[in-house]
Amino acid sequence: MSKYQAHSDGRTKVDFVKLKSLGYDFVMLRAGYGMYDSQKDKAFESHYAAAKAAGLHVGAYHYTYATTVSEAKREAQCFLYWIRGKKLDYPVAFDIEDKSLKTLTTRQRTDIALAFMQEVEASGYYTMLYCNADWAKNYLDMDRLKHFDVWLACYTTEARRKELYKREIPGIWQHTSSLKLKWVYPKGSLIASKLDADIAYKDYAAIIKKAGLNKL
């Protein structure tokens, strides 16, 4: 979730209590994008507070525009600043999918992903990669990234996903961007009642707690 599920001033529009009552148990929140403090997602704090109050597990992600390793490291430090003090019991993720990075080579894109994720992991966080099936197949060297779990966006059936993503089961599968939950937004909300929906294949909250990661 991001500012697109919030009011213009950053206040969340999502009823996280209702979300939990419907059987969902975790959310991944965008902390921000880029390498400047002004690029923090304006709804991150509000989403985080409401999700934690509702008893949901919470993770965070960063959307990248980095085109060099040095920029990726600057983004990592910005992201770490944004999430400081947060009790994140789900992974933190590096979101690489922007079309501007397609002008780079596969090696360069992979170097960028590694630079960010290694920097964040070294700070004590359970770090993972977010990408779609097309990027995993055509734009990244997934063998070099195999140390990290994958949060895979692939909006299709599970059978088709296995055809498109011929690797092990991803850590998290984002299987749709069009989940309609009309009860999750307040009555009269002008925001579109669609959300991304994910399935986690690991008990990340237990793994992270046991390993003492994410500053918990």
Image (tube, grey):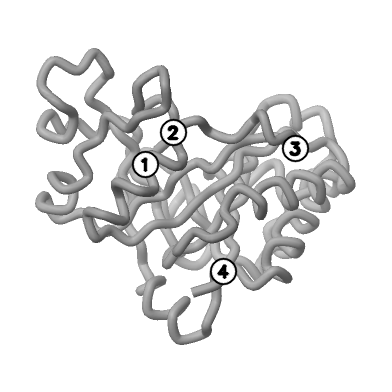
Q: Is residue 165 left or right of residue 50?
A: right
Return the disc, 4 or 2, that comes first in the chain's sequence. 2
**Which mark is in front, 4 or 3?**
3
Dot 2, how many residues are within 10 Å of its Cα: few (below 14), some (14-19), or many (20+)? many
Q: Residue at x 85, y 45 (%)?
A: 108
Does 34 sit above or below residue 84? above
Q: CA distance from mark 4 to mark 2?
A: 23 Å
Return the disc, 1 or 3, that comes first in the chain's sequence. 3
Q: Which residue is mark 4?
A: 126
Q: Which residue is mark 3?
A: 35
Q: Which residue is mark 2?
A: 43
Q: CA distance from mark 1 to mark 3?
A: 21 Å
Mark drawn on residue 47: 1
Dot 3, how many residues are within 10 Å of its Cα: few (below 14), some (14-19), or many (20+)? many
Q: Residue at x 74, y 34 (%)?
A: 36
* Residue type for callout 2: Ala
